[in-house]
Each structure stands twice: as C-alpha cells, then as structure tokens.
Image (cartoon, rainbow, N blue to C red):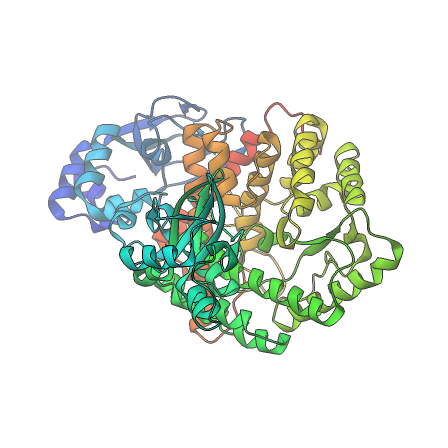
C-alpha cells in the first residue's frame, strides 16, 4: 500500500487524468487528497447524499449498487467513484460499500471542481462528452442544427387572391423578392412565384389584369418554425420547389427560399435525396444508397452529433420509400382507397446508421374491400422488393407490409393494439415494442393520428401492460462486468466484442419507449422521448441529464466504430472490441453503461415487475 508522498505521486501518475496534469497541478492535488481508512461493511455513502468528493481506491474493494440495491460493479485499486454525482447536481447517484478492509483517497468536492476548472485535460476526462460542452459552443452551426425560424424571412410581404397579376408583379419588383404568399384573410391560400408569372402569364400571353388566384399554387405545403434547415432542403429537393411557407398554428409567420439556404447547404445528404427523387428504378436507388457509408464517414468526421447523422441517413430511406410508392402507383394505377405506409424500427425512430433492414406496414381505409386487397399486396411487394434492392434488406422477422398480417384496414389495427394492451403475453410485448415506434412515411397521414393518440391513452391507463413492457425491456442489459470491465460476447464470430446495438443503444431505446407510454408522449425518436420525459418531470433532473449524456456517448461510440470500419474498407457492423479503446474511452463508456443500468433499475420501482 502506498504510504509516502513519493509513493502517492507514483500511484497517481499511473491513473488518468492525473498522469497528464502539469507538475505544479499534480503537486497541489497531492496535498489536497485525504486518506480515508475503510473496514469491511462500511457504508461510504448512500444514494441521494451530498457528495463529499472524488474517491480513489488505494487498497481494497468497493461495491457500487443502484438506489434499489442492484449491484453495478465491484471496484478495486486505482478505480475511482463519486465523480458522476459531483458533475451532476452534487448528490450521489449510487450506493458505495466497502467489501473488505482497505484505504481510500478522497479529493474534497471544492478541490475537485478547482482541479477540472484549472486543467483542460482533467475537464475533458470528467465531463466525458456531456450533452452541452465547450466544443458545442465553438463548433460552427450547420443547417442540420439550425431551426427554420432562424432561417426564414419573418413577416413576409403578402397579397390577396383578388389582387391582379400586375399588382403582384410590381410588389415582387419593388421588394426584390421571388415569391408572394397569397392570403385569404388570415389563412394562407396559396403562393405565387416569378416562375409562375414567366410560365403561366408571359409565355401563355395571359391577361395581367386577371386575379392572381388564376396562376397561384393553392394550398402549398408548409413547415412549422420548429423544423430544421435540412427538413426544408429535403422538401425542396423531393417536391421540386424553391419556396416553403412557415406556418405556426395556422398563422403564416415566415417563408424560406433557396436563397435563404445558400450559406447552409447540406450538400451531401441533399444531393442523395435529389438523386433519389429522379430515380426511375430500384437499381438507380441502389446506386444512391451505395454512397451512404461514405456519407456517414463524412458526417461523423465533420463532428456532427449522432442524432444529426442518423436523421440525415433516415431522410434518404424515407425519400426512397416515397419514391417507390410513387413508382408503384404509376405502374398499378391510383389506389382504390386511401392508405398509409408506415415505418417502424430504426427508420420509424429516425435512427438509421450504416446498416439497416426494413420494418414497415400498411394501414388501409376501412372502406377497403376484399377485391381491393390484391392491389395493396402488389404495392407492398413492389416497394419492399425495391427497398431490398436498394440495400434495406428484408426483415428477418417478416415485419413488413408484404405480410398480410401487417397490411390491414384501420379497424383491424385498432383491434391489434387493443388486444396487445389487454393481453400482454410474450408475443404481444414483442409486437407492441416494434409497433409503438411507427412513423408515417407516405400516404394519408390522418389514418394514423387518432389511432396513435388512442393507443397511447389505453396503454398509459393499463398498469399491468406497462409493467410487462418494462419487464420485457430489461431483457436488454448494458454489457457490464462486475470487475470494472465489460461483459463481452462469449462465443461466435464476434467473441470478445460488445454488441453496441443490442446491449448498447437498444436498452436506452427501450427506456425511451417506456417513458413515452407512461407519459403519452407523441415523440418516436429515442432522444426526443427522453428529453420530453425529462421536461415533463417523468425523470429527475439529474437522471434525465445523465441518461441523455449516456445515450449520446454510447450512440456516438457506435457511429465512430462504423465510420472506422468503413474507412478501413470493411462493412459497418455493431460489434466493437473494447481493446480498440483507450483507457479514457473505456472508462467513460463503462460509466455510461452504469447510468443505463441505474435508470433501468429506477424504471422498475413500484411496478411489481413480472419476471
């Protein structure tokens, strides 16, 4: 056991980040550490207490457990603990107990904070990629991180449907603008552009004294001010227009044009969407999706956050799906009744990475007849076959619209969800876990709106169903070993690797879904679900911050791993060896998994979980 100051110095120099501290800072920290003896069974701290400081184990072992007593890990010499509470709200987030006699080093809380404030390396180590950090503050804003209300021209010049074409043309000239929203009272009735005047008036010799309603585009597509810049760009690319009105609760608040986007061009993802819209075959689309791995590398390399990368990659899958639906209708003719194509799984959550299968279904209007069903069977086959050719391979579990079970009238879907909620057996839990991540892609969206709201209300009222869903979610556990290591896969092709999907992000996806059910939250995206639950008070302030930080770190590590494989000329996968990580990265990744385990334990409290 180290005794002298020299021994303590050597001891600290064997641990990161103390080995990177300038000599003067290390010497100061040495004098601030307090030596604390511990005896077997001693409680070092309990959940929710004020944090005394950062602990480092000189000798002996310490057991860390969650608030409910679940063992998280056994720590030995050179391991530290207590920093998560210090970096959070100053209270402990776990329990700590001595497993045998030994000795600890305690760096008091004030001295700990002074150390990380004075040393950038220590700050980076202990902040470990938290949701908001200095890098985020200085990194240039991109289109994918910019809300539409920051891009739009607010309070745009407008005209009325009765204004003459001449009047409108003069307004555009005088204000040097290329379009005018056309209003009917306070309602947006249409939009007219210079292109309309050139093509529909000048080229056709139309009387310019006619009302502008003769040439306007009626009921134009709009976006809310909460949309992001890439939503505008992708809409422009896919729908082939250059002006998007911004409407907030039926009120026109602004307009975004291609000129507004010039300095924010997200050229990579937008160019792929552009090529998808012009594709005429699934083989053409396969050429587009073949560029997705390189797009992932570029986006990750540019420092984009994981949720931005996966959102942009999912946008491409959405565009391909809609293009295939359009091509199917061209081949088969117009649909006999309204329908809605929905995605679930990672596409539904807008969380696709470099590898993905397809999970989808069809909801049909209740007026559908047996004679109509062959049309939708053909449509489903055309789209699913096209997705497979484009690289979104068939779902191994046959969760696709080509399965008649998942191509049904709305009344049947209502009965599905009602039965799953009322009788939550094993199959029902599995299906509900998939189908609660549904997101409309193409077709008549109103078919889903009432069903979505009703289902959330029914699920939230049924505590037994929620308890079963929680129990089912706990089958996916973070890869934590007791001895400060990782529980890697024990056999097979990926032996000694971590499955960063099933044991990394999926436990957090499951938590997000539980929060959405409990709180009747509309969000499908995992990070949005956690943030909404946090904002609604479902999760404590500290727990919400910790879980968002943990999700960001784990999801980013997964994307970094895939980008590394692609750069090396290999196919991306989800299996990462801990050996490729530095001690710094291993430490923080494991701490993130500890947070997930802790939040899994917290979500079970008071439920009487069914095993």
Question: Residue 488, image x and y in percent?
Answer: 54, 54
* 342 w.r.t. 155: above or below: below
- Depth check, front residue: 286 or 173: 173
- Depth check, front residue: 1 or 253: 253
Q: In this view, does 575 lie to the left or right of 48?
A: right
Residue 282 visible in this rendered orientation of the protein:
yes
Residue 576 visible in this rendered orientation of the protein:
no
- Quadrant including the C terminus: top right
**Picture residue at 43% right of the left edge, 23% below the top:** 46
* 526 w.r.t. 328: above or below: above
**Picture residue at 56% right of the left edge, 32% below the top:** 601
* 81 w.r.t. 571: above or below: above
Q: Is residue 533 left or right of residue 195?
A: right
Question: Residue 379, image x and y in percent?
Answer: 74, 64
**Picture residue at 34% right of the left edge, 44% below the top:** 155
Given the current orientation, which residue lies at the most extreme right position?
370
Q: In this view, does 169 lie to the left or right of 604?
A: left
Q: Is residue 148 left or right of residue 363?
A: left
Question: Residue 10, image x and y in percent?
Answer: 22, 47
**Picture residue at 54% right of the left edge, 73% below the top:** 278
């Amino acid at each position: 056991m180290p005794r002298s100051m020299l021994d303590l110095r050597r001891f600290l120099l064997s641990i990161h980040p103390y080995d990177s501290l300038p000599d003067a800072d290390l010497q100061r920290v040495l004098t601030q550490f307090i030596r604390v003896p511990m005896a077997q069974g001693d409680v070092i701290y309990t959940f929710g207490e004020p944090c005394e400081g950062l602990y480092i184990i000189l000798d002996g072992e310490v057991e860390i457990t969650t608030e409910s007593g679940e063992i998280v890990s056994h720590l030995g010499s050179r391991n530290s603990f207590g920093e998560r509470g210090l970096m959070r709200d100053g209270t402990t987030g776990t329990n700590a107990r001595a497993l045998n006699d030994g000795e600890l080093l305690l760096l008091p809380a004030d001295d700990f904070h002074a150390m990380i404030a004075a040393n950038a390396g220590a700050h980076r180590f202990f902040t470990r990629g938290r949701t908001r950090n200095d890098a985020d503050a200085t990194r240039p804003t991109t289109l994918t991180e910019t809300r539409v209300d920051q891009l739009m021209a607010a309070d745009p010049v407008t005209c009325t449907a009765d204004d003459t074409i001449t009047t409108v043309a003069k307004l555009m000239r005088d204000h040097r603008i290329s379009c005018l929203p056309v209003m009917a009272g306070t309602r947006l009735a249409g939009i007219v552009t210079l292109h309309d005047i050139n093509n529909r008036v000048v080229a056709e010799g139309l009387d310019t004294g006619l009302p502008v309603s003769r040439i306007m585009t009626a009921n134009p597509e709009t976006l809310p001010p909460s949309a992001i810049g890439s939503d505008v760009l992708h809409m422009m690319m896919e729908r082939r227009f250059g002006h998007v009105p911004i409407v907030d609760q039926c009120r026109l608040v602004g307009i975004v044009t291609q000129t507004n986007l010039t300095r924010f061009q997200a050229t990579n993802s937008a160019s792929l969407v552009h090529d998808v819209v012009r594709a005429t075959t699934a083989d053409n689309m396969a050429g587009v999706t073949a560029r997705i791995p390189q797009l992932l590398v570029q986006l990750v390399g540019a420092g984009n956050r994981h949720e931005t990368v996966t959102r942009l990659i999912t946008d491409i899958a959405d565009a391909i799906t809609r293009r295939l639906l359009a091509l199917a209708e061209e081949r088969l003719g117009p649909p006999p009744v309204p329908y809605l194509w929905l995605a679930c799984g990672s596409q539904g959550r807008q969380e696709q990475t470099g590898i993905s299968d397809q999970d989808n279904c069809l909801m049909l209007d209740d007026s559908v007849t047996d004679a109509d069903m062959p049309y939708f069977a053909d449509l489903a086959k055309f789209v699913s076959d096209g997705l497979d050719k484009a690289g979104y391979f068939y779902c191994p579990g046959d969760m696709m619209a080509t399965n008649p079970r998942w191509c049904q009238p709305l009344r049947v879907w209502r009965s599905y969800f009602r039965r799953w909620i009322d009788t939550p057996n094993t199959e029902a839990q599995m299906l509900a876990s998939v189908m609660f991540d549904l997101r409309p892609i193409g077709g008549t969206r109103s078919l889903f709106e009432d069903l979505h709201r009703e289902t959330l209300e029914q699920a939230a009222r049924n505590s037994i169903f929620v308890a079963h869903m929680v129990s089912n979610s706990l089958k996916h556990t973070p890869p934590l070993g007791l001895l400060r290591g990782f529980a890697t896969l024990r056999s097979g092709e990926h032996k000694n690797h971590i499955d960063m999907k099933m044991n990394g992000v999926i436990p957090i996806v499951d938590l997000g879904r539980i929060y959405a059910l409990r709180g009747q939250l509309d969000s499908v995206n995992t990070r949005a679900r956690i943030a909404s639950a946090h904002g609604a008070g479902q999760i404590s302030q500290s727990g919400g911050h910790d879980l968002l930080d943990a999700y960001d770190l784990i999801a980013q590590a997964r994307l970094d791993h895939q980008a590394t494989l692609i750069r090396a000329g290999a196919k991306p996968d989800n299996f990462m060896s801990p050996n490729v990580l530095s001690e710094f990265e291993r430490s923080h990744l494991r701490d993130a998994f500890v947070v997930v385990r802790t939040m899994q334990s917290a979500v079970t409290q008071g439920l009487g979980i069914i095993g």
